[in-house]
Image: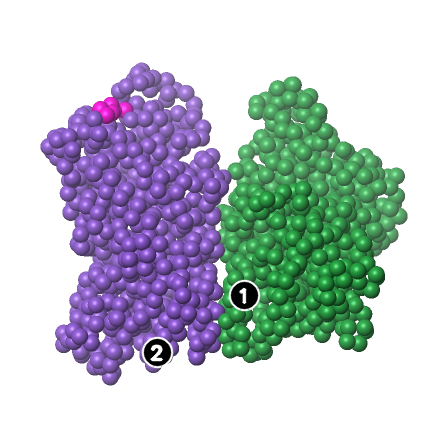
Chain colours: A green, B purple
Amino acid sequence: MTAALDGSGASTALAGQDAPPPSRHPALLGEAPVRIAAVGVPDFAEVPRTGGAEVTALDWRPPAAGAPDLAWRLAELTGHPAVEAANQEAVSRLLAVRPVWTRVLPAREAIGALDDRTSGRRLLLHAGPPIAWPDMCGPMRAGVIGAALLEGWAETPEAAQHLADSGALEFEPCHHHEAVGPMGGIVSPSMPVLEVEDAASGRRAYSNLNEGAGRCLRYGALGADVMERLRWMGEVLAPALSAALRARGEGVDLRAITAQALQMGDECHSRNTAASALLLRELAAELSTGEHARAVLRFLADNHYWFLNFSMAAAKLATSAAHGVPHSTLVTTFARNGVEVGIRVAGLGDSWFTAPATQVRGLYFAGYGPEDANPDIGDSAITETYGLGGFSLAAAPAITGFVGGTVEEALATSREMARISLARHEAYRLPALGGVGAPVGIDVRAVLDTGIAPVVTTGISHRKPGIGQIGAGLTHAPLECFRKALAATEVPPFATGFAGALADPAGGVGAGSAGGAGAGSAGGARAGSAAATAVGRATGPSADLPSDTSAGPARGTGADSAAGRDTGPSPDLPSDTSTGPAMSTGADSATDTAVGAAKRTGTEAATGPSAGSATRTSTGSAPGSAR
Amino acid sequence: MTAALDGSGASTALAGQDAPPPSRHPALLGEAPVRIAAVGVPDFAEVPRTGGAEVTALDWRPPAAGAPDLAWRLAELTGHPAVEAANQEAVSRLLAVRPVWTRVLPAREAIGALDDRTSGRRLLLHAGPPIAWPDMCGPMRAGVIGAALLEGWAETPEAAQHLADSGALEFEPCHHHEAVGPMGGIVSPSMPVLEVEDAASGRRAYSNLNEGAGRCLRYGALGADVMERLRWMGEVLAPALSAALRARGEGVDLRAITAQALQMGDECHSRNTAASALLLRELAAELSTGEHARAVLRFLADNHYWFLNFSMAAAKLATSAAHGVPHSTLVTTFARNGVEVGIRVAGLGDSWFTAPATQVRGLYFAGYGPEDANPDIGDSAITETYGLGGFSLAAAPAITGFVGGTVEEALATSREMARISLARHEAYRLPALGGVGAPVGIDVRAVLDTGIAPVVTTGISHRKPGIGQIGAGLTHAPLECFRKALAATEVPPFATGFAGALADPAGGVGAGSAGGAGAGSAGGARAGSAAATAVGRATGPSADLPSDTSAGPARGTGADSAAGRDTGPSPDLPSDTSTGPAMSTGADSATDTAVGAAKRTGTEAATGPSAGSATRTSTGSAPGSAR
């Protein structure tokens, strides 16, 4: 079926121009087998089907969810040389980061705003985009109460709540301070944080330490057991880790551990079993010399999520390095506070683009169900912006049951995420997909072009404060965040001065030629035709469909991408697993995509940002004036 | 192509009896597409090919390598109720073992024969089948010299060699003392050994401790560094481990660690990275209290092969439990001394069945090549008899490059080994094959019926003493071992008294009916026709071909098995990865195979030991008098 979408046959049938003459169409339909892919409105499939053709209806969705103004903006930004260059720069910066765990220290010593010794502020950091105390969800409120108790600001939970109600506490996102925290993500001044550093740039990022499984403050659990563990972590665990790191004499290379863990069944968000064991192994010898060595090592040995906060801090470090590149559409933050999901984009400064938090589809502990679940919460989705978590789900077949789903679905998820990603990570590789690099660097344009929302693997908190984790599963970032980000993205001026013509939305739908150097775009063209029927003959396996082994972002443009998305790879297609690791190309080359230019036609023009990802010869002319 | 081999079409064409009348053949050849599989002698393919048919020549090999007497013996043993019952008993015993690491102690305290305090003997244990000093290969001789130095029996390597030359040292296989040692496998009285125990039976097995990578005695390296490490292992490491185990208060469940490690990229023979980290994690807290904790934990953290010897001891414990079941054809030992490979079989007592050691196909360290390599050596192939190593190669895509090969070949290897195995392990599962159990329990009959030799992943020693490891790779057990074992296997008497007729080989080839209750056998029939041409129409995907998800041994019988073996699974066949772990059946049900009976025809009779593995309706009659 996908084969029907290849090459000039399809575009000819649609556009009726160039290459084979129109007179060929009746002959095509008269020969068997004729296979047709109908894209978009389901009724479009019925006409050829009643004519005897084999028709597959594709669940294609128009770009930017069909909003004409946004679709036009998307068209303008797709293939735009300034945006392409900016994204290449941003993702290169992200990939260049080498996260090394260097220190463990109290948050007040690591994060200036939390230094209550001088400021007198009672500031707490929290997960996700900004939110005020009255708006916080149950598990985050529990985190605030626990933190106030830990800091000695209140003696009882009731007193802590009263303190918060009185307005005496301040709240800011972790992300505003180069920090990240899973679930509620509450970080208070005395809590220990881990520091990761990129030696080349001197850049640093932070996360709190993972409490383990069971009843944890981050999930909104409260009680003497929770508070006792938090105190022990500050008084015993953190000093032991700090001393061990000093004794080791050098930091711990988190990139190396992450790369290994992906070969060992982890996706480094919702499964950290291997990475946690490897991290323990790294520091076990040095930890053994401490006074509380046995308790510390027992705690670490029993905590299979220990690495999560390291994974998050590393991801924060890398994505922060990509932030601030003008015109880049790379997503540098994806975080949830339990009420809203927010993203930030490399070229859009400090703005958050938010939408209501989603429900998580997953499995629940005995006695709990979806009605008990808090919506999606936590900064841990930063791992997805770094190519881990759901983007590397193919690496973690063992958690497919845990988060609900099959191994095949896990592979398909990683393939799908590649279609909205700018690059593949050269060190983080997916063994089940033949060693191809993890898809990394979410592109706002690709999300809206394909309608594919970034996936996230995550835990599920009870909606009420004080209870804790009740399950785990999968969810997706709301497309609304991306639509808002797109709306805020200005189209950079073109070097050749044709920007004026491009900025005119009236030239849009079916205009035949919007001209404009470097502005070739499938997105805009697709918005112009809300549905199309592609006709072609079955020609056997199509070798030029998007493959995971292609160096560039594996997202197709136009109808082809819709086909690839909804039907999955054909068994005849080149398989991910048939290529060894040596055949995968590194991330550096992955960003080396063609920045071409194509003249748009009314319905189809398919010169995407990557020559490797375009599956069809453009029917438009390539003026070649882009550079 | 495999589809051409299904059902009655093939056997009809061959035997010309039953079902569709012979007159149908010309019509078949007159229709397109006609696809023919020619099995055996390549020239057989030419006749139909010149007639215009699409012919695939299969590299089919006759059972028992074409030796008529052995083929007849194989036919008698295949499907024999006493053998089937014995194998079910043996593999059930194997699978019931729960290996737990309980102690670390000097070999002289664990193994009675090594107690030189009372015997005055200078006995050393070695890998593989029995071998005398003058016959030993270079790396094993180096091990002997190192052990003599370690025990203080000699002051210099020259003196140690002189001592051995003088006949003052005794040598016995590790396997004769419930012990195993990798590579040279030399175990001397003062060396520490680890003990694994099966609580239910009280059974115990032993292995020496792993020295790590680099220059090691087990690979035949000699020198001050090697000796210093060995002494440290006895004086510091072993007491530390012993104390930690006591402090822990309970043993370490090696079955649980193995099961996890298979989900984390290990096959627990040539890759033990995950298992070693998990084992370190288990004992890190208790190890931290010791005087030399830092050095011990550093050694363990740096030794990615640490778990190998535990894997071997667990495998030895399990296979020993299966040994001694009369009439069982299950392989309980597979070991190499660097000169010979030997196997032992559950129903054949203490006899070794040997053949010259093979060369290992693999990758070499820089500066070395096949001409430097010692032939296959070590007791570590015991892991393959336990379903690990090469049998679980699908679990370890990361080592495919290391041992030479692709990920696809690794998957195919595990599938192929399932065809010579009696069961699947209920706890050891292969994530890349949809969570199906590791194939476990090598059946001598299946090896000879299919011609598939058991694979082994292994390290490569330099042939000269004193150098050490120079590479790693894959090799196979020589079929000669299995032929000798088969020749030594007596056919059990049949309950109904028809054994006399069966024991007469003259009734063999093309006899049409050899009768005999319970003696239905494809093997004998296949031996009678050294080659056959199977004709059938392509009928699309065949759903009843052997699948990894079938509960029983996935080896087919007759021509079908040859097709499956040599062409690999068709992409249209049910895929391993399409079935989740929940669909795999446990090892217990895997041995619950049908013990049927079929009347043999001249060329084809396909009632195998497993209803699930036979892909064709028998053309013979089933007298049904077997029980």
* Region rendered in magenta: B619-624
Marks 1/2: CA–CA distance: 28 Å
- For disc 1, the neighbor class at 10 Å (few under 14, some 14 to 19, many from 20) is many
Q: Which mark is residue A300?
A: 1
Residue located at (44% from left, 30% from top): B541
Task: Depth check: give the residue in front, B122 or B281.
Answer: B281
Q: Residue B297 location in percent, x, y?
A: 46, 72
A391 vs B226, left or right, is: right
Q: Position of residue A114 (x, y in %)?
A: 76, 70
Which residue lies under the disc numbered 2?
B235
Main SS category, magenta section = loop
Q: Give the vertical position of B308 relative to A50 (above or below).
A: below
Chain of the residue under the numbered disc 1 shown in the image? A
The structure residue drawn at horizontal position 58% and vertical position 50%, both measured from the top left corner, is A393
| Horizontal and vertical percent position of residue A460 | 64, 50
The amino acid on which the numbered mark 2 sits, given as a three-letter code, is Glu
Does B607 appear above or below A608? above
Foreground pick, A477 / B449:
A477
Q: Chain of mark 2?
A: B
Corner quadrant of residue B558: top left
- Residue at 41% x, 50% y is B428
- Give, as a three-letter code, the residue at label 1: Leu
